[in-house]
Amino acid sequence: GSAQPLLITASRNQISGVINGVSIDLHAASSSPVTLDVSRTTDTATDNLQKFTDGFNGILDKIAELTKFDPSDPSSKGILLGDSTVQSISDQMYQALNASLKQGGRYKVLADVGLTIGDGGKLEFDSDKFNSAYSTDPDSVQKLFTYMETTTDSAGKEVTTGKGLGYVLENAI
């Protein structure tokens, strides 16, 4: 079948609302048909994951500072040295990073989309691996972070719980 033309009028050179989530910038008039190519961009997600990585590593640096111990200068020990709460927080953060989502589809762990634990326990983000995973199966990547599960409680009321790893990380932190 041939494409059917779509007539749209606007008072400015940017049109939105024609395609959900897409803004169209008009640059020039054309007497011949124009083809519009739409592709997904991962820029915002990539930026947010890099910020998360940097923030997570900042927390690790602060924990290291607060729990430090230098045998050559025992008076410079961290104020939370030996505090079991700090170790518990650290353990919970790493457990969340290593969590798995069975319902996620193709991608089940954060390492599948480029978030891994590297040298010194620091979080590393591989944006190329994330972009590759997203272009291969964007729905599975989204599910990995935002999967919601609806169950019925003992009173028969529906309860929706965030099970995606984004929720797991948020709850842990």
Image (tube, rainbow, N blue to C red):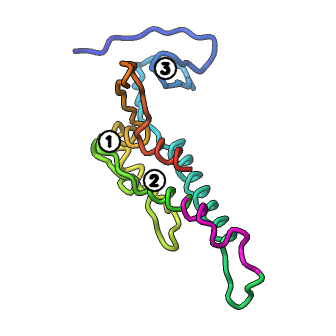
Question: What residue type is disc 1 on?
Answer: Gly
In percent of width and height, residue 145 lies at: 43, 42
Q: Residue at x 36, y 18 (%)?
A: 156
Residue pushed farthest right?
75
User: Based on the displayed image, in which of its 4 quarters is residue 79 positioned?
Assistant: bottom right
Residue pushed farthest front?
154
Residue range of the region highlighted in magenta in the rendering: 76-88
Residue indicated by mark 3? 30
SS of the residue under disc 3: loop
Residue indicated by mark 2? 96
Residue indicated by mark 1? 104
Label 2 packing within 10 angstroms: few (<14), some (14-19), many (20+): some
In percent of width and height, residue 38 lies at: 42, 31
Distance from the alpha carbon under mark 2 to that under mark 1: 15 Å
Question: What residue type is disc 2 on?
Answer: Ala
Q: Earlier in the sequence, mark 3 or mark 2?
A: 3
Label 1 packing within 10 angstroms: few (<14), some (14-19), many (20+): many
In percent of width and height, residue 127 lies at: 46, 55
Callout in the foreground (3, 1): 1
Callout in the foreground (2, 1): 2
Q: Residue at x 32, y 42 (%)?
A: 104
- The reply to whether the C-beta atoms of the residues labelled 3 and 2 are less than 8 Å apart is no
SS of the residue under disc 2: helix
Q: Earlier in the sequence, mark 3 or mark 1?
A: 3
SS of the residue under disc 1: helix
User: Based on the displayed image, in which of its 4 quarters is residue 27 positioned?
Assistant: top right
Question: What residue type is disc 3 on?
Answer: Ser
Distance from the alpha carbon under mark 3 to that under mark 1: 45 Å
